[in-house]
Image (cartoon, rainbow, N blue to C red):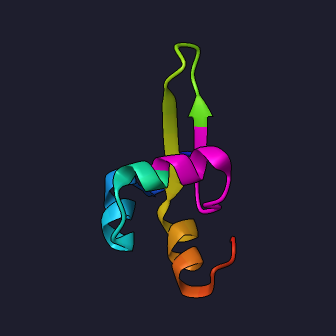
Amino acid sequence: MTDQIETYSVEEVAHFLGKPAQFVRLGLQQGTLTFGAAVRGSGGRYSYLIPKRKFQNWLETGDEV
């Protein structure tokens, strides 16, 4: 399968929500924002994955896909 998932950046989501980017980062790290994932790498830094479809569904319904 070669289809790529379309994603938003943390900054884009923060803009849509009218919140600081740190709000989105912490929400993903703590699991309170369920539309994406935060993964801690070996260097201690986080990477974020926010699929567009899952975020848009969360905005519309408050539910996960």
Q: Nearer the viewer, residue 21 or 6?
A: 21
From the top left corner, tell me how far across and down residue 50 is, in percent: 50, 54
Q: Residue at 48%, 47% (x, y): give it.
A: 25
From the top left corner, tell me how far across and down residue 34 is, in percent: 65, 61
Q: Can you see residue 4?
A: no
Q: Residue at 54%, 19% (x, y): give it.
A: 44
| Residue 16 inside the magenta-drawn segment | no
Q: Residue at 47%, 65% (x, y): give it.
A: 52
Q: Residue at 47%, 55% (x, y): give it.
A: 24
Q: Is residue 43 above or below residue 27?
A: above
Count how many numbered circles sit on residues in the image. 0
From the top left corner, tell me how far across and down residue 51 is, in percent: 52, 58
Position of residue 11 in the picture relative to residue 56 (left or right): left
From the top left corner, tell me how far across and down residue 30 is, in percent: 65, 47
Q: Can you see residue 13?
A: yes
| Residue 33 inside the magenta-drawn segment | yes
Q: Nearer the viewer, residue 20 or 49?
A: 20
Position of residue 15 in the picture relative to residue 44 (left or right): left
Q: Nearer the viewer, residue 11 or 6?
A: 11
Write the start and end of the magenta stretch as one range: 25-38
Q: Is residue 37 above or below residue 57?
A: above
Residue placed furthest toward the bottom: 60
